[in-house]
Image (cartoon, rainbow, N blue to C red):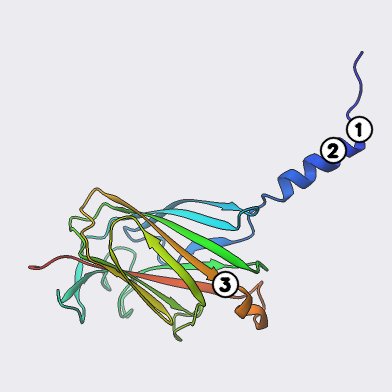
Amino acid sequence: MYRKPSLMIWVCCFLLFSSQAQSILITDRWPDDQNTITGSFQDNINQVFFWEEDYHEDNLIPYPSPDGYAVVNAPGDPGCPAGTEACYFDKILTLEGETGVWEFQAGVFNTSPFDWSDYHLEFYDPLFQQPLDNALLDVQNVIFSVVEVMPNAVWLSGGTQFTGHHNLITVTSDLDPFGGWDRLEFARSQRHLNRPPSPY
């Protein structure tokens, strides 16, 4: 005999699916350049936000580093407006009310023509004007053996991410220090810089 599902079953299903609703959003600041965010996923139970990115930029700009250059889109290139200083692979994470300790995992695929000697993440306010102290608790990755954590940046070095290779970078951060912000408007911004090995 067929029985209609009880109200309790519908409530349980609603709670199960609503608990996995994605409330953290990731946006590419320069969506028309060669770098793309190919997907994202949020695990609310374990407080993990993951995204996959394809770093396809093929332009070098002078950068104050031992190598002297970084792989960054330049003004006038496709997707980088004229008058911009440089179009880094900027991503905006909108927190949408999340609190506590979260893992942010970036799957970084190097499809640029360069092998990378290091990888930088820098954290700014939503307008990319003020450095942001991110309350970073831990940083892990697969390729680079040296991890330098600064108040608003992480520098990874001591290895080579070859073109065509993938790296998983995990940044653990406490979101509670951002409690004074309007979380519906606040965005935590990341700026990625990649330096090719010398000589270039």
Q: Position of residue 54 (x, y in %)?
A: 34, 53
* Image side of residue 103 versus residue 89, left or right: right
Q: Could you tell me how far apart the alpha carbons at marks 3 and 2 are, in whole angstroms?
A: 34 Å
Q: Position of residue 32 (x, y in %)?
A: 38, 60
* Residue beneath disc 2: 10
- Please tell me which of labels 3 and 2 falls first in the chain: 2
Q: Could you tell me how far apart the alpha carbons at marks 2 and 1 are, in whole angstroms?
A: 7 Å
Give the amino acid at mark 3: Asp
* Image side of residue 195 versus residue 185, left or right: left
Is label 2 in contact with label 1 (beta carbons under 8 Å)?
yes
Q: Position of residue 123 (x, y in %)?
A: 44, 76
Label 1, secondary structure: give it: loop
* Residue beneath disc 1: 6
Q: Is residue 9 placed above or below 35 in the rendered structure?
A: above
Which numbered mark, 3 or 2, is in the foreground of this view?
3
Residue located farthest toward the bottom when viewing the structure as drawn: 130
Give the amino acid at mark 2: Trp
| Crowd tier of the residue under label 3, counting other residues whose Cα lies within 10 Å: few below 14, some 14–19, many 20 or above | some
* Residue beneath disc 3: 174
Give the amino acid at mark 1: Ser
